[in-house]
């Protein structure tokens, strides 16, 4: 069973702090990894994708990938109350008969003013 | 540019009733997906269509049928609704072997009583 695991939280950080969200995956064939943000009652929206080992930065967001450890993380710098949401980690294996995203259950982040 | 459009947004069914959830995308994507999201369970794939004319089962297909009507439209049908199908349903689309992840519709909140 291919799985993506995340700590469900809630993760609470003060405004302006760094929020660190973590994810592990079981499928060693996974090639791409995605972070989605989902506000309560809304649909998931893509915020970051990463394919290579190392860091990828986009504004206040940094995704980190370590394929040897099967570990993906998302750092949010200068956290804002508007970042309060559930963050979904997902992996994709393009091989085989399907290239479907496997989602974790999400980590709920709360940024306190 | 509407992206992925789902209808209806809300629906209440009685046990045993049938209904079809509609999904249409205007991004010329080849692949389309139906997920359900339940508290504590994350996003689970029901059915997907890698391209026009093909459909395949996902993780939780029982009780559902799908139709890929054309490249734009992918519908999900509940033939005899059960309370266990109370959930939020999301349609998504992507390019085949997408490195850009999926684009989600706004969701359908279905309650079966």
Image (cartoon, coloured by chain):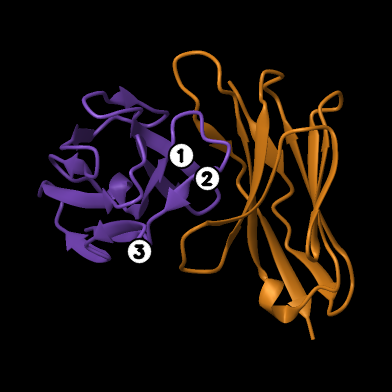
Query: Do the residues marked 2 and 1 share a common chain?
Result: yes
- Provide residue B96's location: percent of width, then percent of height: 44, 30
Query: Distance of mark 1 from mark 3, alpha carbons?
Result: 27 Å
Q: Colour of chain B?
A: purple
Q: Position of residue A9 (x, y in %)?
A: 73, 58
Of residues B46 and A50, the one drawn nearer to the viewer in this rendering: A50
* Camera-nearest label, 2 or 3: 3
Q: Are marks 1 and 3 on the same chain?
A: yes
Residue name at image x 26 percent, y 23 percent: B54
Mark whose residue sits in front, 1 or 3: 3
Where residue A32 appears, as percent x and y from the top left, is 66, 33
User: Which residue was labeled with disc 1?
Assistant: B44
Q: Are marks 2 and 3 on the same chain?
A: yes
- What is the quadrant of the C terminus of chain B in the image? bottom left
> Taking B68 as reference, is A43 left or right?
right
Q: Is residue A16 shown above or below A77?
A: below
**Vertical order, A67 against B90 (above or below):** above
In the picture of the structure, the residue carrying the numbered disc 3 is: B1
């Amino acid at each position: 069973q291919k799985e993506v695991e995340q700590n469900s939280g809630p993760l609470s950080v003060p405004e302006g702090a760094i929020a660190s969200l973590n994810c592990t995956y079981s499928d060693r064939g996974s090639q791409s990894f995605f972070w989605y943000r989902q506000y309560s009652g809304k649909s998931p929206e893509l915020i970051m994708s990463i394919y290579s080992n190392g860091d990828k930065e986009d504004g206040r967001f940094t995704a980190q990938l370590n394929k040897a450890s099967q570990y993906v993380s998302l750092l949010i710098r200068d956290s804002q109350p508007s970042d309060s949401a559930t963050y979904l980690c997902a992996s994709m294996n393009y091989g085989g008969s399907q290239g479907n995203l496997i989602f974790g259950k999400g980590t709920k982040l709360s940024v306190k003013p | 540019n509407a992206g992925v459009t789902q209808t209806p947004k809300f629906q209440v069914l009685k046990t045993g009733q049938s209904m079809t959830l509609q999904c249409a995308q205007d991004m010329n994507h080849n692949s389309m997906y139906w997920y359900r999201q339940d508290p504590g369970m994350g996003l689970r794939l029901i059915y997907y269509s890698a391209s026009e004319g093909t459909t395949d089962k996902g993780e939780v297909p029982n009780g559902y049928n799908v139709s890929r009507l054309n490249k734009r439209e992918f519908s999900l049908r509940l033939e005899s609704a059960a309370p266990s199908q109370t959930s939020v349903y999301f349609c998504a689309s992507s390019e085949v072997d997408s490195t850009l992840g999926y684009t989600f519709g706004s969701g359908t909140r279905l309650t079966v009583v």
